[in-house]
Amino acid sequence: MFGNAAVITALSALTTVIAQQTCVVPFGGYGVNDVEALTALLPNCSNDATIVFQDGVKYNISTPVDFGTLNNVEIQINGNLQLPKSIPYVQELVNATAGGRLYWFTMQGYNITVSGNPDQSSEYGWVDSYGVPWWQEAQYTQPLGGLLNRPHGWSIAANSSTIRNMKLRKPIAWSFSLNGNDMHVYGNKIDAAYDLNNPGVFPFNTDGYDIHGNNVLFENNWVFNGDDCVAVNAGNNITIRNMVCEGGHGASLSATTGVNNVLFDNITSANSLYATRFKSSLNSVGNISNVTWANIHVHNATFPIFATGVYYDQNTNRGRTPGVYPANSTATHIENFTWVNVTGTISDVYTGDGSCTTDPCWYYVANATNTAGITLQLLNGTATNIQIHNVNLKPIDGKGVSNVVCDPTSFTDGTDNLGFECVNGPYMPN
């Protein structure tokens, strides 16, 4: 027999189920902007609702979608969401926004789930941005990053939320900007794949995920792109595991301060400029601590293990030389950083990627060879308790050895715990 508390709990759960309504987005047909019908639904579907894009339907998402504030809402993308193909049309829309920056899909709130087609092999459930023409135009446009007024993908600011089984195809620019606590992101695909043998058509700045939040779990996601696979920008207690990153700039921590307790575990990197990366801009002031990259499987990376406190942006620093900065420069202080069990191959035959449009290249590092397995580009006294252990990296062509870029003056506590000889030269574990 149920007690009173159990009955109340059961009734509350039943009430929640009953209150959850389903809102099916109508399809208007050829040439109709389906955003208008979606927008008409939202006032009645922003709380305790499931918004459904129907399976087997290719929706015309001809203008940006602001879902507004949602609470206890799931958005099911079972059909395809197709963005406009006209570059001038999209540029005009973006240009009309403040600052010329726009996410095509935005939402905020609490307990939001954005889910893709549960049949991951289905031809439906894709968000199609038709980014390839934008990448092609980027070859002829300065500054780097493609044409002006490019839209980004999804901006989601919500606590206690989930992004699962999403499929994004040929994004124009960034895919996800995620801001919130207690988030779970899993089973997603970002396909900004490009021909590795033709880097002239390169998906500039197609970042996979930018993360700002606490208590965040990423797992079982796949990204093929031309920038950070996943980048932690701010937050605490973030775990990223069982992830595949291809063609881009790896599993990254990109921040100047305000990050603590981050774990990257069981990451596979293939044909990437970076496999793992910490980057912070020159003259930053801040602290980042307790970050681990563990069980990293590297297949052909130019820089498998990379950390820099003097990140060089070839747009804002155009005309300057990477690695050249005033003697009084400052940088973020990092503490308790660990790389452990990093194995695989260094790309010593075809180094770099298609993002290089300046001379010298933005990712140029003084003293780095074409077999740079470990590169620590850190200013004097900006690192404490850095440990790199059980590293087995070899040039992909089998010639030569893994090399290191390292300056002992970078470390406030010396190099005894570092795990290898801190010299510019061959990797020598100790």
Image (cartoon, rainbow, N blue to C red):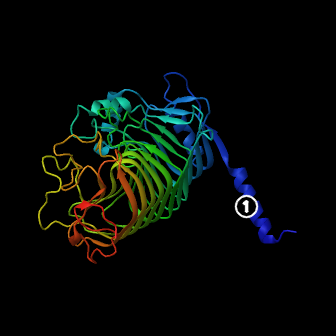
From the viewer's perspective, is 235 left or right of 420? right
On the image, numbered disc 1 is attached to which residue? 12
Q: Residues within 10 Å of mark 1 (few under 14, many from 20)?
A: few
For residue 110, say whether it is visible.
Answer: no
Q: Regarding mark 1 in the picture, which secondary structure is present there? A: helix
In the orientation shown, which residue stands out farthest toward the front?
399
Q: Which is more toward the observer, 273 or 26?
A: 273
Q: Which is more toward the observer, 167 or 75?
A: 167
Image quarter in which the N terminus is found: bottom right
**Image: 337 above or below 48:** below
**Image: 290 above or below 233:** below
In the orientation shown, which residue stands out farthest toward the right?
1
> Residue 42's x, y, as percent?
55, 42
> Residue 172's x, y, as percent?
38, 37
Q: Residue at x 20, y 63 (%)?
A: 283
For residue 266, say whether it is visible.
Answer: yes
From the viewer's perspective, is 98 left or right of 22? left
Image quarter in which the C terminus is found: bottom left
Q: Residue flagged by tag 1: what amino acid is it?
A: Ser
> Residue 184's x, y, as percent?
54, 56
**Image: 350 above or below 293:** above
Tally of marks: 1
> Residue 230's x, y, as percent?
41, 52
